[in-house]
Image (spheres, grey):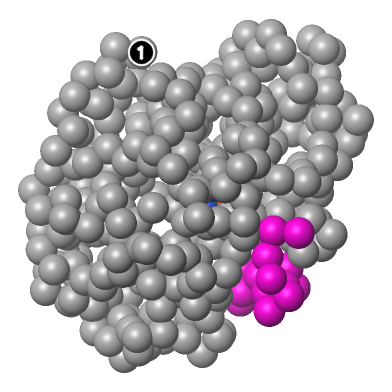
Amino acid sequence: MKATIDKLFRTGDASNEELKALMDLCDNEGLKEAAVARRKEHYGTAVYIRGLIEFSNHCRNNCFYCGIRAAQKDLRRYRLGKSEILSCCNEGYKLGLRTFVLQSGEDNEYSDEALCNIIYSIKSSHPDCAVALSIGEKSRASYQAYFNAGAERYLLRHETASPRHYARLHPTSMSIENRKRCLWDLKDIGYQVGSGFMVGSPFQTLDDLVSDLRFLQELQPDMIGIGPFIPAQGTPFAHMQAGSLARTLNLISMLRLMFPYSLIPSTTSLASISPQGRLLGLEAGANVLMPNLSPASVRTLYSLYDHKDAFSASGLEILKEEVSGIGYEVVACRGDVKSQKDEN
Ligand code: 5AD
């Protein structure tokens, strides 16, 4: 396996069979070491932080895996208004956050005008901050409007690049074609784009994961978020098996080697399946953490999956210490993606 790791380190690519073998690796020391070396070349020991504001758990979609799907019964739904969102940002700013991620289900109650107004207000109060959106599939015109209002980044995981697998995770009203259309539109408009997928979602094969990596090679996103699938009660997949911690960590390391400059978060789902998950993600090659800035009163309602272990901004101090304990450093800056240009 050492030869394959060396190849991925040197060239940033490997054959499908080699990639599958790395995903299945039990002893990941060599892979991790290579990923950490590559990460240090480009990002040193810096860990970037983004404040996540989950501003609405209403959703029109019915993804089979998701705990806030439209058909979910017994879930109290909430929406934050502009002033609540702005105060989350103010709070986060004081704590050193310089990127705000506005995330929600696909909720049509917020008009484009209302969203643009919120984005514009955040940028006016905090011109030194980046605003990222994670609000799902929209028209190109809407994406353009948010961009013009000041949003610079957009997170939209493709979830799975395999059409067969996509159809097993989503109702027929949704398609991988539209998902990809959105991602290409976002790139074309000029956003820094984040995509990604779940590891171990039901019916996923190793070949599906290869397709995910190949799709990312085409898209060349600036950010790549992955995390294990975790069953969510009340969903069609409530009794399915969770994704594996080991495979997720292997894939984080592989992503670091295949996309050396990418911003890779150590995600909430990783922390939710293992108490050390968040730090293990950093040690596998991730370089971003996303503390939760949503008001405590609504935080448990953004229940994408069971036992979601979001860390709040108030826990940031503790996390900073843990992060420095493993040799990294949480930094207060926008944390823009680097590129080869920056280093020449
Ligand atoms: N397990 C893990 N991740 C999930 N997501 C949604 N539901 C689950 C689940 N049950 C992820 C999706 C989505 C992101 C916001 O959360 O990948 O893009």
Identity of the residue drawn at 12% across and 43% down = 95
Q: Residue 221: where, in percent of width, then height?
A: 60, 54
Disc 1: CA contacts within 10 A as few (<14), some (14-19) or many (>=20): few
The image shows residue 104, relative to residue 234, as above or below, that is: below
Depth order, front residue of 236/15: 236
Q: Residue 131: where, in percent of width, then height?
A: 32, 64
Q: Quadrant of the N terminus?
A: top right
The image shows residue 46, relative to residue 222, as above or below, that is: above
Q: Secondary structure at mark 1?
A: loop
Mark 1: is the Cβ under 8 angstroms from ligand 1?
no
Identity of the residue drawn at 56% across and 18% down = 37
Q: Quadrant of residue 153?
A: bottom left
The segment highlighted magenta reads 168-187
Give yes or no for residue 181 being in the magenta stretch.
yes
Q: Residue 140: where, in percent of width, then height?
A: 56, 85
The number of numbered discs placed on residues in the rendered structure image is 1
Q: Quadrant of residue 271?
A: top left
Q: Quadrant of residue 176?
A: bottom right
> Would residue 332 be visible to someone looking at this image?
yes
> Would residue 51 be visible to someone looking at this image?
no
Depth order, front residue of 38/65: 65
Q: Main secondary structure of the magenta part?
A: helix
Left or right of 100, for residue 122: left
Left or right of 211, for residue 339: left
Left or right of 299, for residue 303: right
Which residue bears the numbered disc 1? 326
Give yes or no for residue 322 being in the magenta stretch.
no
Amino acid type of the residue that numbered disc 1 sits on in the rendered structure: Ile
Identity of the residue drawn at 31% across and 21% down = 323
